[in-house]
Amino acid sequence: MLNRAIEEHYEEMKATLRRRGHGSDAADIIHELYIRFAEQPEKLGRAHSIRAFLSRAAVNLGIDRARRNGLEQRIFSGSEAEGLAVPASTPAPDFMLEVTDRLRRLKDAIRELPCTRRAIFVLHRLHQLPPDAIAQKLGITRVTVDRHLRAALLHCLERVTESD
């Protein structure tokens, strides 16, 4: 029944698809329609007018195909450069190795600092104390705290970036 219906109404379905703007894909759409009805032949048996049913099904399938193609074009329309510009959701594997190495160098640099300078650096950077509070806590002037902070930051920066 399906074979005969497709053969009888093939040209009419193609003409309908052309009028609806699916002319270049008409044969593919009808072929896909045939495959779908071959898998579920009972759908064709329930139709009052097989010709109208097949034409409507072909148009609907053409609309679905056009929507799918439009979506695929929007999804895959970017260039390779645009694709590479999208940030990764996870860091690159070598990134964590680099971070670990930089942290090790920073810890070594902090250990190398003189005791007072190291204390000022730790209070300021790790405990978020402002320079005035550090000066009061250690019983030194604000200028001394600033000088030690500058020296400690410079030392750490040099040590962390020396092999980059």
Image (cartoon, rainbow, N blue to C red):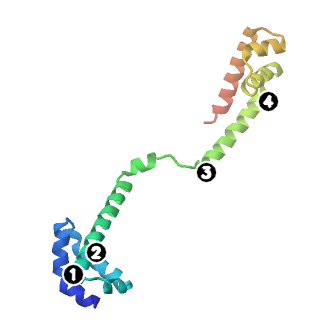
SS for tag 4?
A: helix
Considering only order in the chain, which callout, 2 or 1, is on the residue closer to the N terminus? 1
Considering only order in the chain, which callout, 3 or 2, is on the residue closer to the N terminus? 2
- Mark 1 to mark 3: distance in Å? 60 Å
Q: Which residue is mark 3?
A: 93
Label 1 crowd bin: few (<14), some (14–19), many (20+), radius 10 Å: some
- Mark 4 to mark 1: distance in Å? 86 Å
Name the quadrant of the C terminus: top right
- Mark 1 to mark 2: distance in Å? 10 Å
- Viewer-closest of 107 and 159: 107
Label 3 crowd bin: few (<14), some (14–19), many (20+), radius 10 Å: few
SS for tag 1?
A: helix
Q: Left or right? Give the position of 93 relative to 39.
A: right
Q: Please tell me the numbered disc located at residue 111.
A: 4
Q: Which residue is mark 2?
A: 57
Q: Left or right? Give the position of 157 relative to 2.
A: right
Q: Which residue is mark 1?
A: 51
Label 4–label 2 contact, CB within 8 A:
no
Considering only order in the chain, which callout, 3 or 1, is on the residue closer to the N terminus? 1
Give residue 138's quadrant in the image: top right
Tell me the residue at 45%/45% (across/down): 85
Does 15 appear above or below 115?
A: below
Marks 1, 3: nearer the viewer: 1
Label 1–label 3 contact, CB within 8 A:
no
Instruction: Tell me which amino acid carries mark 2.
Output: Ala
